């Protein structure tokens, strides 16, 4: 069998409401997840036996704690499978709130399900993904979706167009655990802004209006830099700007690609790492995530 190449696309959060801590220890959230055209790539090659992982990253662990290895271990649990050599070309930086590790795990589940001919259903893969992390299930489907409860309960939104986005990748990272630990929860229920936006706006490229990311207030010493990046994107023509997830990445939504390209170029010339990209719909994601190669 030929190797498989899987594309693990990043996400941004189009708003993030955190309502409180649940009895099971997770947080009750409301968010809109959106895949964007910025990705890692994983190559899966049949091998003699066992699972081996290599990566282009100089800092990423390749041991059993790596989410790719955890996904492979779950799939091979109590099943007769062949060996596989996996190479991860890591492009999505860690600590940015872009979901790179979760995306890697999700496409590993899908790719090995095909490579090992396990014929697991979407529901079975979803359950395995939840065991790895609450945002991993989203990356089985991609596109745009409202995520509620712990984050793994998903409701797809029918946004099929492409919206220009500029990502700012700061020179610092933010720990998700640290951000949540600094969060001061005062809300007892959702104000429904996010849900109203989700069902009212016909296209994800429209302004995000008064949506907020509650974790922006829990970024500690990095809060001023996050705010500066948001304001700079707005100055350069973004219709809205927000931190993604627990940070540290900041994104801006733009009405046209030319303005987005110019903004990214201006930021780059100013010494800020910025990437002009676009949203990816669920249909496009299903067609782009995997390709056979020699």
Image (cartoon, grey):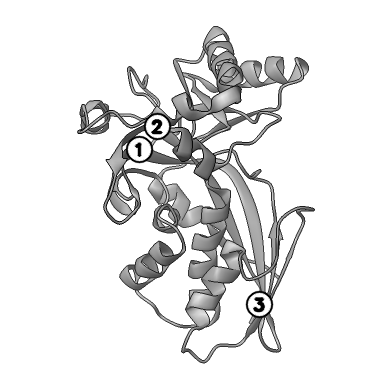
Check the image and report above or below for 261 versus 119. above
Which secondary structure lies at badge 1? Answer: strand
Residue at 49% from the left image edge and 33% from the top image edge? 244
Is residue 280 visible to the viewer in this orientation of the structure?
yes
Check the image and report above or below for 80 versus 216. below
Check the image and report above or below for 258 versus 44. above
**Which quadrant does the N terminus fall into?**
bottom right
Residue at 65% from the left image edge and 61% from the top image edge? 42
Figure quadrant of residue 180: top left
Q: Which mark is residue 2?
A: 3
Which secondary structure lies at badge 3? Answer: loop
| CA separation in Å, label 1 and label 3 | 36 Å
Question: In the visual, does 75 lie left or right of 121?
Answer: right
- Looking at the picture, tell me which residue is in the foreground, 172 or 86: 172
- Looking at the picture, tell me which residue is in the foreground, 275 or 64: 64
> In the rendered image, which residue does mark 2 sit on?
14
> In the rendered image, which residue does mark 1 sit on?
32
Residue at 41% from the left image edge and 80% from the top image edge? 119
Question: In the visual, does 264 lie left or right of 202?
Answer: right
Residue 219: percent from left, percent from top: 53, 28
Residue at 41% from the left image edge and 66% from the top image edge? 131
Q: Pointers 2 and 3 in contact (CB under 8 A)? A: no
Q: Earlier in the sequence, mark 2 or mark 3?
A: 3
| CA separation in Å, label 2 and label 1 | 5 Å
| CA separation in Å, label 2 and label 3 | 38 Å
Q: Pointers 2 and 1 in contact (CB under 8 A)? A: yes
Between disc 2 and disc 3, the foreground one is 2
- Residue at far top of view: 235
């Amino acid at each position: 069998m030929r190797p498989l190449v899987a594309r693990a696309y990043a996400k941004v959060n189009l708003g993030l409401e955190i309502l409180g801590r649940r009895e099971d220890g997770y947080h009750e959230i409301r968010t809109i997840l959106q895949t964007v055209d910025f990705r890692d790539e994983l190559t899966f090659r049949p091998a003699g036996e066992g699972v081996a992982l290599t990566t282009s990253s100089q800092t990423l662990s390749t041991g059993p704690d790596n989410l790719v290895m955890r996904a492979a271990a779950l799939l091979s649990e109590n099943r007769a499978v062949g060996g596989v050599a996996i190479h991860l070309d890591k492009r999505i930086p860690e600590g940015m709130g872009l979901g790179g590790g979760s995306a890697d795990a999700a496409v590993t589940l899908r790719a090995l399900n095909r490579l090992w001919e396990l014929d697991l259903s979407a529901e079975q893969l979803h359950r395995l993904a939840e065991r790895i992390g609450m945002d991993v299930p989203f990356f089985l489907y991609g596109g745009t979706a409202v995520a509620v409860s712990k984050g793994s309960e998903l409701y797809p939104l029918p946004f099929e167009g492409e919206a220009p986005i500029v990502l700012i990748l700061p020179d610092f990272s933010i720990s998700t655990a640290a951000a949540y630990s600094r969060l001061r929860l005062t809300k007892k229920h959702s104000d429904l802004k996010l849900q109203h936006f989700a069902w009212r706006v016909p296209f994800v490229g429209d302004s995000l209006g008064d949506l907020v990311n509650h974790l922006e207030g829990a970024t500690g010493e990095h809060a001023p830099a996050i705010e500066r990046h948001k304001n700079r994107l707005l100055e350069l023509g973004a219709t809205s700007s927000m931190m993604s997830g627990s940070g540290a990445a900041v994104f801006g939504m733009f009405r046209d690609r030319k303005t987005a390209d110019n903004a990214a170029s201006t930021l780059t010339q100013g010494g800020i790492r910025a990437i002009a990209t676009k949203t990816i719909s669920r249909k496009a994601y299903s067609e782009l995530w995997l390709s056979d190669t020699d």
